[in-house]
Amino acid sequence: MLSLRDSLILVWGVLSCFTAFGLSSALAEDLVIIAVSGPTSNFERGQILDEQSRLDLQEGTGLSLMTQAGEVIELKGPFLGQIPTENKPSSEENESFLSTVSNLILGVKKQSTVIGAARRTLPIELADKNHLLINVDSSGNRCIPNDGAHFWRKNNSQMIDVSLRSDSARLTGIKWPENSNLLALPKAFHVDGDLLVVRLGKEPRRLILHVQPQDLDGEQIGHVLKWMLSMGCERQAVTLLNGLSETQQ
């Protein structure tokens, strides 16, 4: 029969194990798969994984995972083990971001986006920035680069007259050439937060422009995604995510 002292030691040890397990679970972070390549029968884009999940990747399988902080982790098979991450405290904001990214990939709120399909037809200097093109098929929020922005249209069969008006500038007499999908936005209109009224022939578009901050590194995909979603540029975020998947094929 255990003495009182031994019993207390046993109870303390059991409680310590549960406490350690609880802390480990509380600190666990979710990640979302944003791109896959190779033999991927067990994985799909948009799938959410716990960082404590044990992965078994075959030779040739590749996964791109995004953390709640927006960092991207690349894994290449063969790989067996837990996902290597920096264990950072979670937050409701970060969890919401990851859930939004997953939903966009899975198409829960996905709208039709056609810019991605034209990726291979863009000039080489714009191919990696197609998610920042200004689609003129509708009104709404548009996120644009800080080093030169372009309008984009799907139907380029006709030349159309274009006029631009914002709080910062006005311009008329612009010709959008036939057989051209792209039209440069004059630098005078690169003003963050401006409402830009674009008239395409007789059709008006009301676009709210959001200029990429100078200190936002375009190579930090997760941070770019967070910025775009916070500005309401959801369709462009979908284009960016689809582009990441294409590069893995």
Image (spheres, grey):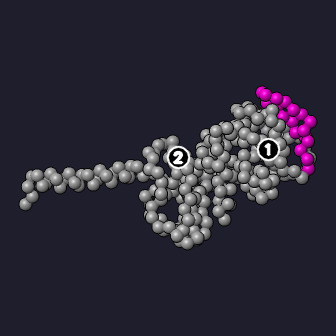
Q: CA distance from mark 2 to mark 1?
A: 30 Å
Q: Secondary structure at mark 2?
A: loop
Q: How many marks?
A: 2
Quadrant for the C terminus, please: bottom right
Q: Closest to the observer: 185 or 233?
A: 185
Q: Quadrant of the N terminus?
A: bottom left
Q: Which residue is mark 2?
A: 69
The residue stretch that appears in magenta: 161-178
Taking the spot 66% from the left edge, 37% from the top edge, the residue there is: 213
Residue at numbered disc 1: 150
Q: Kindly tell me whether residue 136 is visible in this rendering.
A: no
Amino acid type, mark 1: His
Instruction: Tell me if 42 is positioned left or right of 132 in this view.
Output: left
- Determine whether label 2 and label 1 are within 8 Å by CB: no
Main SS of the magenta part reads strand
Q: Does residue 193 sit above or below 89 in this rendering? A: above
Q: Is residue 84 above or below residue 161?
A: below
The structure residue drawn at horizontal position 24% and vertical position 52%, both measured from the top left corner, is 15
Residue 109, position as x, y percentages in the image: 62, 50
Q: Residues within 10 Å of mark 1 (few under 14, many from 20)?
A: some
